[in-house]
Image (spheres, rainbow, N blue to C red):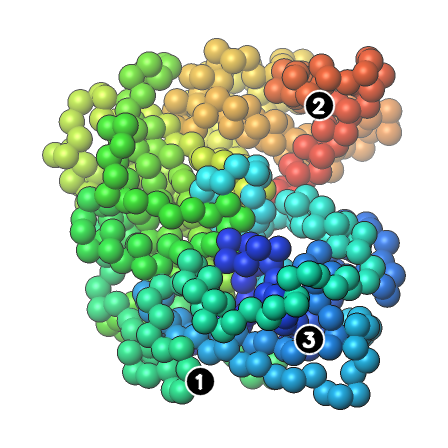
Amino acid sequence: INISLPGCRPFRPVYTHQCFEGEYIAGFSPTDEAQDQARSTADRIRREANLERHDAMLPHSSYRHHKESDPRLEITLSLSPDCSRCSVTCKESAVPPTMAPNEIKKRPIVDTTNSAEEDKGSQGATKRQKPSVTFADDQQNGSRTNVAEEAMAATTSTAAAPSASLAEKMEIKDILCNLRRALPNIMYETEADDGIAIKDGYLQQPHGTILTEYKRKIRVGEGNKEAEEEGDFVITLANGSDKDVTEYHNKVQGLAMFFIETADNVDLSSDEGGGFWKVMQLYRRHENKYSLVGYTTLFHFNSPFKKPKPGIVMRVCQALILPPYQRGGHGSMMLHQVYNIADGYYDAKLKMKQECTGNMREIVEVNVEDPAPGFVALRNKVDFQRFKDSVTSSNDVIDSKYLGGSVGAPGPDIDNETFWLPLPESEAIVGAAKLRITPQQIMITHEIFKLYALEAHIARLSGSVESIEGLEKKYRLMVKKRLLKLHREELGACGGKEEQKAKLGLIFHETLRHYRSLLKTI
């Protein structure tokens, strides 16, 4: 499947399991170009995961269903700029007679720049079928767990196995029917011209209230014609109760099934449980018209027993940046705007003071539903930046003694033994309320900040290896205290103290690797 968006480089889906069981189409194989891209991507992922590779490995577990004698199928999806409509072309091509049937063709690895896995911004963190969050543009190298598992699963299959379902080739009409689950309105189903309605399908005005505008470099073209150009972007916030907003979102949200493992459709007009929906949308502006770049849905609900004070919790439920715009900092920008809304920065613009009065209507926390690893990395990075800005200015978030400083004085001071104190739950609740994040999140940002301070201190230190190891040990023990509480049930299932100690060590080293990968991007 190849997807095109006007003015952007073509891209491929990351997931197709919600359209095709097993992520394959019975009786067909991908085009040779798509297979080369898949092999190149699988090889890169295996290298990142330190997995051995040999020629007989399959690039994806679905390849066990393919035969070299299968006809090739190329599906081209052409999206309108606003992503509310599309055209679909299904092109079947026969295999050259020189191909040996039932044999996996061993092509050399080709270095490609636009494979589906290259745009694999994040993986679902759980298996439950609920909306998951992904801002693929800020994916960290350490958030590849599920990708590595997929690569390992494909590694166990070293040859194509005939499938019983291949006896019947899937009809094109059935393929189109399955694709409709993830696509906006299909206007054309032929190889004919896409039509003006597709190519010129821009929005004349963005939905909702414009919160902020900014510029970013974007890549356009392919191969030798690839270039960079500067684009204008706007972020808006719209009410789910607005009929036009809901209708538009219903048309575009199915695309998330191609890029979020556990994507599900959301009814923005629903007020189930007394809550309400808003949607933050990101558009690219083309003079006086707009194209869609991404969105995030925000569910608001009342939390009357929230400590230290009750109010509205704003939950990030499902978020997406389209692949051509990934790794451009758009995810960070959108999450910062979410926090700005919670902080009341846009109250006057959104007229929140008129619509939401009283303490019970104040947004007291921003949390995330079922975050994928890529979004976990993004969230931790943004939360760390906000925590660091506060600590290095006025430090009105936590008591300075937990940074090694005197009460009321900004830290950090590594030479003070109080620097190594873990953040207690009572202090985390108070600090989290000030940043409008969860207590667990402020504990994480507190640890990242101390690692940031520690590594800066070591870089300036001319001391012995023993003194450096002593500081690192203090940090390790501090973090392990939190991890021991967080993973108590998992560690309790271990066979004994030695196994528990080894498991905790693995969890710590994975946590440390994640923290360091974040700090490298700052």
Q: Is residue 293 visible?
A: yes
> Closer to the N terminus: mark 3 or mark 2?
3
Query: SS at mark 1?
Result: loop
Q: Which residue does the numbered mark 1 point to in the structure image?
A: 191
**Image side of residue 468 versus residue 328, left or right:** right
Residue that label 2 marks: 475
Q: What x and y, as percent, mark residue 468?
A: 80, 27
Q: Is the C-beta separation of discs 3 and 2 under 8 Å?
A: no
Q: CA distance from mark 3 to mark 2?
A: 57 Å
Residue 418 in percent (x, y) is at 63, 13
- Tag count in the figure? 3
Q: Is residue 190 above or below residue 175?
A: below
Q: Position of residue 367 (x, y in %)?
A: 42, 32
Q: Name the outermost residue toward the left.
A: 354
CA–CA distance in space, label 1 to label 2: 61 Å
Along the line of sight, which residue is nearer the eye, 203 or 261?
Answer: 261
Position of residue 295 relative to residue 407, above or below, is below
Please state if 285 lies on the left or on the right of 258 as rendered: left
At 45% from the left and 42% from the top, the residue drawn is 131
Q: Residues within 10 Å of mark 1 (few under 14, many from 20)?
A: few
**Which residue is rendered at x = 34% and y = 28% of the image?**
313
Work out whether residue 355 or residue 371 is closer to the camera in this orientation and state it: 371
Read off the residue under disc 3.
70
Q: Element at badge 2? A: helix
- Spatial separation of the CA atoms under disc 1 and disc 3: 22 Å
- The mark nearer the N terminus, 1 or 2, is 1
